Image: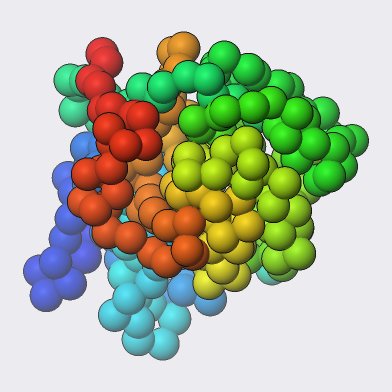
């Protein structure tokens, strides 16, 4: 029977383990920290966090290591403060084992980028975060890819384009950008070409969870960058839903941000941040 337990010293425990009656029932970590739990007789089951905003299920930070037979060590990450249940389900979807994961806030301030204007925001109707720029557009589910791009191309002299929506780095899981009818293919990435004249040399910020979480997602962002002649900043895993104020966007620090040049080349974070004055953004701290 599947069971969660405290890893051995050789397996390098991570977190604070609460045991009652000989059974592990809770693991506590801080936001921004990794945790680890031993899985006995259950690595072939579907194991997942039921609150991806607190403990994301992205493979880059949620994975099994040190596997032996049906046992191994599950690694996870505390993205933001809150509570999640770690559940193991059988092939019928029944929960056969679970424990609680508590992620504590580390307090302090959060980092944001403040963007120069005029800029534009595209917000999916179902996105939990709404960006607010000089021009902001709520994109309904029925809006086509071409209609989305046409709405942006109708503006002039934009410095930044921010996009808030769900996203996937693997098209077999869902659209790269769940915006309108969805940007689903690499051909859709080329549809950004009309933005060259209104946004060329600027930045497209994709607040879309895990759009760079796979090779095809990274390629999608490279094509967007080359087509629009823009820099692209996109997350490699789940983004914590945080409140944003006027003309601001999250830094994505904990979500493995990728930075792409207008030539479609990946940049180091430090190299991109040095372009702050040229590109019209600055990092600020907000409580």
Q: Position of residue 94 (x, y in %)?
A: 66, 56
Q: Is residue 112 left or right of residue 120?
A: left
Check the image and report above or below for 31 versus 123: below
Q: Is residue 142 left or right of residue 8?
A: right
What residue is rendered at 42% in x and 57% in y? Answer: 261
> Which corner quadrant of the image does residue 236 belong to?
bottom left
What residue is rendered at 33% in x and 60% in y? Answer: 267
Q: How is the image coloured?
A: rainbow
Image quadrant containing the C terminus: top left
**241 or 74, which is in the foreground?**
241
**285 or 63, which is in the foreground?**
285
Q: Position of residue 230 (x, y in %)?
A: 51, 48
What residue is rendered at 46% in x and 49% in y? Answer: 231
Q: Is residue 138 left or right of residue 144?
A: left
Asked whether residue 185 is in view, the answer is no
Q: Looking at the image, which residue sits at the far left?
A: 9
> Which corner quadrant of the image does residue 119 belong to?
top right
**241 or 50, which is in the foreground?**
241
Asked whether residue 150 is in view, the answer is yes
Q: Position of residue 117 (x, y in %)?
A: 48, 19
């Amino acid at each position: 029977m599947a069971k969660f337990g405290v890893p051995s010293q050789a397996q390098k425990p991570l977190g604070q383990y609460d045991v009652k009656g000989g059974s592990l029932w809770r693991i506590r970590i801080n936001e921004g920290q990794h945790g680890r739990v031993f899985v006995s007789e259950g690595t072939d089951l579907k194991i997942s966090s039921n609150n991806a905003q607190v403990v994301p299920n992205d493979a880059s930070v949620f994975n099994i290591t040190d596997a032996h037979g049906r046992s191994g060590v599950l690694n996870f990450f505390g993205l933001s403060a809150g509570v999640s249940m770690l559940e193991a389900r059988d092939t019928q979807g029944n929960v056969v084992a679970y424990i609680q994961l508590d992620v504590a806030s580390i307090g302090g301030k959060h980092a944001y980028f403040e963007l120069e204007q005029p800029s534009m925001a595209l917000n999916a109707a179902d996105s939990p975060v709404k960006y607010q720029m000089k021009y902001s557009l709520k994109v309904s589910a029925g809006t086509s890819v071409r209609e989305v791009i046409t709405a942006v191309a109708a503006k002039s002299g934009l410095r930044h384009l921010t996009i808030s929506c769900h996203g996937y780095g693997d098209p077999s899981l869902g659209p790269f950008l769940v915006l309108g009818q969805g940007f689903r293919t690499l051909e859709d990435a080329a549809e950004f070409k009309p933005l060259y004249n209104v946004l060329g040399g600027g930045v497209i910020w994709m607040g879309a969870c895990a759009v760079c979480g796979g090779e095809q997602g990274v390629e999608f962002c490279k094509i967007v960058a080359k087509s629009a002649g823009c820099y692209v900043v996109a997350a490699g895993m789940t983004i914590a839903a945080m409140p944003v104020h006027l003309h601001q966007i999250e830094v994505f620090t904990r979500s493995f941000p990728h930075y792409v040049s207008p030539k479609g080349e990946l940049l180091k974070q430090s190299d991109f941040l040095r372009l702050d004055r040229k590109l019209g953004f600055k990092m600020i701290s907000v409580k």
